[in-house]
Amino acid sequence: MKKPDPTVGLVIRYDFLWSHEREKGYADGAKTRPCVIVTAVLRKAKGGTDILVAPITHSPPMAGTVAIEIPHRVGQHLGLEDARSYIIASEANSVSWDDPGIVPVKPGVQWAYGLIPKGLYDRLRATMLDLVRQRKLKAADRKA
C-alpha cells in the first residue's frame, strides 16, 4: 500500500496536537484523528513536502471555536462515524508529510479517508485565511 501524494482536501489520519494540549507542554496529540490537508508546499531546497492540517471532530464546537459542519453525505462518503462531524477551522498543525504521526486509516488496506468536495474545501480555506488575517488561527508548527 503506497502512501498517496499530499493533496489539498485529502482527509488523513494524524496525531493532531490541540492548542490546549500544546499549552500544557505536550509535544504530540493524545490520539490520531481525521484531519483535512489545507495546504501542501514542496520544499525545493530540502526536498519533501510540508502540509497544514485542520482537525475533524464529533464534539460540537465550543465558544470561540470556528467550525464547519461536514454534510452527512460527505461524512458517509469519507467513512466517518455516523455522528455529526466538524472541521475545526480555528486550529491547525503544520507538519512534514513524512511525519510518523501520519498513519493509515486502515493499516495495509487504506491510507486516507478520501477528498472533501471542492466547495467544502474552498469554504474551509476562506474561513482559515480570514482567521489568519484576524490573527485568530491557533497553529502549531510540528515540523522536526
Image (spheres, rainbow, N blue to C red):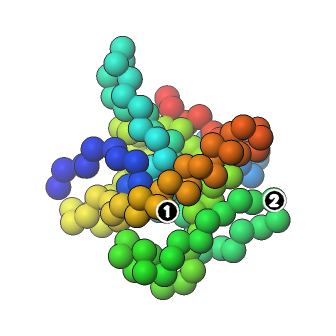
Crowd class of label 1 (few under 14; some 14 to 19; many from 20; radius 10 Å): some
Is residue 110 shown to the viewer in this render?
yes
Name the mark on residue 45. none
Q: Residue at x 25, y 64 (%)?
A: 110
Q: Nearer the viewer, residue 7 or 79?
A: 7
Percent x, y of residue 77: 35, 76
**Snapshot quadrant of residue 27:** top right
Q: Which residue is mark 1?
A: 120
Residue 12 visible to the viewer = no
Mark 1: which amino acid?
Answer: Leu
On screen, residue 74 above or below 36: below
- Residue projecting furthest to the top: 45
Vertical relation: 23 (above or below) 85: above
x, y percent for residue 45:
36, 14
Number of numbered discs overlaid on the protein picture: 2
Quarter that holds the N terminus: bottom left
Locate residue 141 relative to residue 15 in the image: left or right: right
Q: Residue furthest right?
A: 63
Residue at image location 48% in from the left, 56% down from the top:
121
Mark in front: 1 vs 2? 1
Residue at the far left: name it: 1
